[in-house]
Each structure stands twice: as C-alpha cells, then as structure tokens.
Image: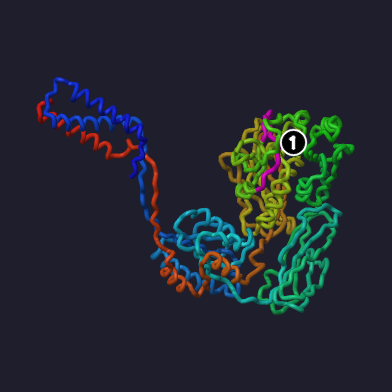
Amino acid sequence: MNIGIPIWMLALSLLAGLAAATVLYFRNKKQHYGKALNAILFILRTLMVGLVVLLLFNPLIRQKFSSVETPTIILAHDNSSSIALCKDSVFYKNEYLSQFEQFRKDLNADFNVDEYLFGEEVRDFDQVDFSDQLTDLSSLLKTLDRRYYKRNVGAVLLFSDGIYNRGFEPKLVAEKFPFPVHSVVLGDTVSYPDLAIRDVHYNKVVSLGATFPVRVTVAARDLAGRKAQLTLKESGRIIEKRDIEIPSNRFSKEIDFMLDATKKGVMAIDIEVSGINEEEQLLNNVRHIFVEVLDQKYKLLCVAASPHPDLAALRSVLNDNYEVDFCFGKETLPDFANYDLVILHQVPNAKMDFNALKSQLDRNTKLPVLFVIGGDTDHDLLNKLQKTFELHSGATNTLLDVKAHANASFSTFTFDAKTDQIITKYPPLALPHLEINAMQSHDDLLLQEVMGVKSGLPLLSFANDGRKTAFLFGTNIWRWRLYEYYQSKNHEVFDEMFSKTLKYLLLSTNDGSAIYAKETYYSNEPVIITAELRNPNNELVTDPELTIQIVNKLTNETYDYTFSKREHDYQLNAGLLPEGLYQYKVSAQMGERKINVNGTFSVVAIGIEEQQLTADVERMRGIARLTNGNCYTAQQMQQLAEDLHKDARITSIEHHESRFEDLIHSKWIFFVLIGLAAVEWLLRKMFGSY
C-alpha cells in the first residue's frame, strides 16, 4: 500500500488538529494535568482531529494486489464432414472417437481445459459427428485470439485435416497468433489421383430467349498426360461435351459454356467430369444446378453525374432478368415511363437539367427511386425531389469517412444478423458533412458510424410516401464488394443486401403481408420462412390462419403447411427439402380481404466438403511451426499428452496489480480513529476528567 497524499493536504490537516488540541489542553484553564499527561493527550487529540480533517479531503491510496492464474489448455476439434468422407471413414467414425474421448478425459483430469467444435461456426464442444458442411480455420484462430486476449493459455490443441473452404488462409492468422498451437492431423494423408469439379458459376434466373454463360472449374491431381471429358446434361439430354487434356499433376482450368433459355420454367442441368478409372473419390465429379427461365424483364435507368465504379458494383448484383441503361451528365433524359426503377447517383447536380429530371419524376409518381448521395449531390435540389429527408450542409465543407453498422430493428425485409460482423469491417464510404432531418417515417437497414461513434443517422434507408424510395448516404460502395472478396472470396453479403434493396423497390406495394424467405437454402439446413400480417391500421396481427403451399418445380411434388403463430409474427420450419427449385404461395383470409403472396427459393447440395478429401499436412505443420508448436498424427495422442506435461510454458502466472482507492474505505482507518479516541478517553477517565 502506498499513501500518496499532497503535502498541503497533510499540513492543513495537522494544523486543524493542532488548533483543536491547543484549545482543549493549553487554552483551557479548567483542565489540571501534569506536563507529561497533558503532552500525551495533546498528541492524541491532534492525531485524531487531523485524521478526521484529512478524511474530509477524500484522499486516495494506492494498493497492490497479487493473483495467480492457472494455465488453460484449449482443445478445438474439426467437425467437418470431409474427415469422415475420407478412405479411413470407418476408423474415424468408430475407433478414433473412442480414443479421442479417452484423451479428453485424461486431459481434463490434469489440466484446466476449454473445449470447442468448429466447422461452419465456432461453438462450445458437444459431440463430434462430422456433420458440418463448411470449414473456417481462420475464424477459429481469430475467435480464440479475441476470446483469450491476455489470458494464460498454455497451448491450443488443433484437431483437423487442415482443409478450409471458408474464410482465408489460416497460416496468415497463425503468423501473429499469441499461443502455441499443437496440430493433430486427421483424415487421409495419402494423395490419390483425383478429378473434380471445383466450382460452377451461373445465373440462377435468366430471361426467356437469352443466352447465358455457365463457367465450370475442373481440377486434377496426379493425372499428368491423361484425358477427361466434361459433360453437360439437361433432364438427361446431353447438351454439350468437352474433351480435357491434363498436362500436369497440379491442373486447374475454367471451361465456359453458352446455353440457350428456350422455354419458360426450370432448367435442371447436370455437370459431370469423367474418364479416369484410378479415382478413389467420385463424389466431387458431379454437380447439379437449377436455372429458372422467366418470361419477364425489368428495365433500370442509372442517371449519374459521370461514370462511377459504384454503378458497376450495383450492376454486378443483377442477372439477365434485368436490362440497365445509363445516362450521364447533360445527356437528354429518356422517358422514365419506359423503366421500372431509376437510380440517381449523386443526382441532382449542376451538370444536368434539374427541371427535366423533376418533370419526369412528377409525371411518374409511382416510379421507385434509389438516391445515392455523395459529394456532387446538390442538397437543396434533392430536397425538392423527395419528402422523406431534409438535407443541409454541415459545419465543415469536407467529406467524412462513414462506416456502416446494421440496425437491429430494421423490418422492411429480412437480413441475416450475422452479417453485421462483415458489414462493420467494410471500408468507409465518402459522404459530405450533412445535417439530416427526417420529415417522414423511414426504415434504416444501415446506420452511420463516424470516427468510432455510432451516430444513429441513416446510411441505407427505405421509405414509401406513395413512391418507394431508398437512400444510400455515401459513395464508393464498390470498395465494399472488393473488400468482401478479399476477406472471404465471395460477395454474398454485398450481393444479398443490394439485390434485396432493388427487389424491394421493384415489387409493387403488398397487401399488408411480408414474407421472409432466403433465396437459397443448402440441403443440410432446414427451410425456415417467417411472415408478418398487418391490419388496415398497419398493426401486426396473428389472428388469421396463414397457410403455405410449396411446389418443387422440377418434380411437381407439393408440400402443404400451416405457419406457427408467435407473439407478433408467424414462422414455418419445413425441415430439409430435396435439392431443387421451389415455388411457394402463402394465403390468409383477413376479414373481407384475401391475401396471396407468391415467391421462389432454391435448395442446393452444398458439396463443398466433398471437393477435397486429402488432408493438408503442410498447412497443419505450418500452423504449428508459426506458433512454436508441434505437429502430431491421430495415432500420436498419447505422445501429445506426455509432451504437454513436460512443456515448461504451461505454468501458472502471478499477476501484480496496483490501483487507487479512497482512503476512507480502508477499514484500518476506522480502528485507528477508535483507538485514538478510546486511549484519550481512558486517560482522561483515569485522571478524573470524565
């Protein structure tokens, strides 16, 4: 303990004590004590009064605390299906699980152990069943780094085959990982000749009569000098065949096909690569895709001050079912009546005819508009085009870096809450310093964050005052798309956010119902659909019975369900559905009003874990090496346990901490004051004063 009290505070307290003692023992003629006793009483009263006065100043004292933190061992086990699909699948489903359970039991008896499973997500350990259809190793390492920051972690035991298909290269995270990782290699470590379809890129929806591309990525391992054949079939009918020559043992090639959408409906396309007899694994040789052909096309118009990469980013989320025209600068505006949606990128501005723009919007009062507001936008003119927000220039004439975060209370359409983690990491948008005043009700999907402060102002907002409108406050969303691809090698969150934005604007105003279904479900996840019903007063109700009919458009198989009622909405869990394209019709009777809502979704076989079944030993060794750990096989778990007991790094750590506390909260002060008062009282009592 260290009492660091200023000299002036001690001096004033001492003077107060001296003054009180002087009045009582030297200025008081009624007291008759001897010199020695008078001096003792004087000192006692001085100390007691001085200490009381000192406490009135509420001084701080610094106290030191010590604690001992025992080491923690983290056990993380891969639960992805690629391990159980390997050639040794019988061993991993039976004998290995028994050995691993014994290892866990012994480990928990000797150490403080925290256990996790990972695959599609990182979660607390329950049971290894190799059911996850994705593997994200980088997410595991980042989660452990964040969760155990500055904790005494003796070691991380990583049980995995080293294969990942989500996130990014785990060795990049391992380079700065603070704890030693001992990797245990699972799965089949023998490399067999293999031919596989690695990826397929295609449009899920196309227009009737359109020619659309299908890009297939074929990979081969240890098959140099051999030939294979890639075949596309529709409903069993061969569309096209391609011969493939494999020049090297590490081979990958993208092959493009152009297919014709000749009839309305669903095209079920089978893609198969074959021709090699030595293959051990054939699960990755076949892929199935479904393409819906619609006899409908939306026309969009982008009006902008000048060409901008944001427009290309928005165009990228649209399929062949959309036709997009552009108009820049002072070009003559086309007739808005010919379009289903208008995107105004930093418009209106000084480079274009505002009167012509306003006239077009006034003539097409139901035409939905997406406003993208940036540095070139004339705020005063924009206020004349819409009634939702009133914008004024802020205190500074500068562009702000505005980051985004999701609004948990957004209700216009569904958006996965988990994606907030990705959205918050997006690069900032460029937005002028603005005063934003809401004039009418609006629903915000994204909110602004400036310099780490969440302002609550809208960043992506929706409104409907007879015309459906959306407002994007900021430019440079193209950086979001590039960043997401850099992080996860896809654009899923960006594409979902803006495709749903455009679809919301394009669809006509509903009849008081809102159906929330994903566009695509994986074959290993249940089909969950939620719905909302509103009465004429726009209040959520759950009185009517809500039914749904789901039809597999490929087989015409029909499923009929009734939604379960919740407090404010409805939910349906249709369970696992076969692979295919589905159309649904939701129906309800609300008084005199009948509600019918149609929609579609697809169920696809995920199949990613089947693409690579040979364990990546080098990656597992690399993670261990970069973190000063060791690499083991599944048969060396006993050796791993022995090495953990010998590891000098797994030891308790003593922590020392200093912190300031109010002196008045110290118990010893109370006893000192009581002691001084008691001694003074006792002496005075003994010598006849009390």
Q: What element carries label 1?
A: strand
Q: Which amino acid does label 1 sit on?
A: Lys
Q: Which residue is drawn at 64% across and 43% down?
A: 404
Q: Residue at x 86, y 54 (%)?
A: 209
Q: Residue 435: tell me if it is visible.
A: no
Rendering coords of residue 452 (x, y %): 59, 41
Which sits in the foreground, 303 or 690?
Answer: 690
| Magenta residues, start to end | 426-442
Rendering coords of residue 438 (x, y %): 67, 30
Q: Looking at the image, is 268 positioned above or below residue 190? A: above
Which sits in the foreground, 111 or 504?
Answer: 111
Q: Residue at x 85, y 29 (%)?
A: 355
Q: Give the image quarter of residue 557.
A: bottom right
Q: Looking at the image, is 678 positioned above or below residue 170? A: above
Residue position marked by numbered label 1 in the rendering = 468
Q: Does the magenta portion include 286?
A: no
Which sits in the foreground, 607 or 492?
Answer: 492
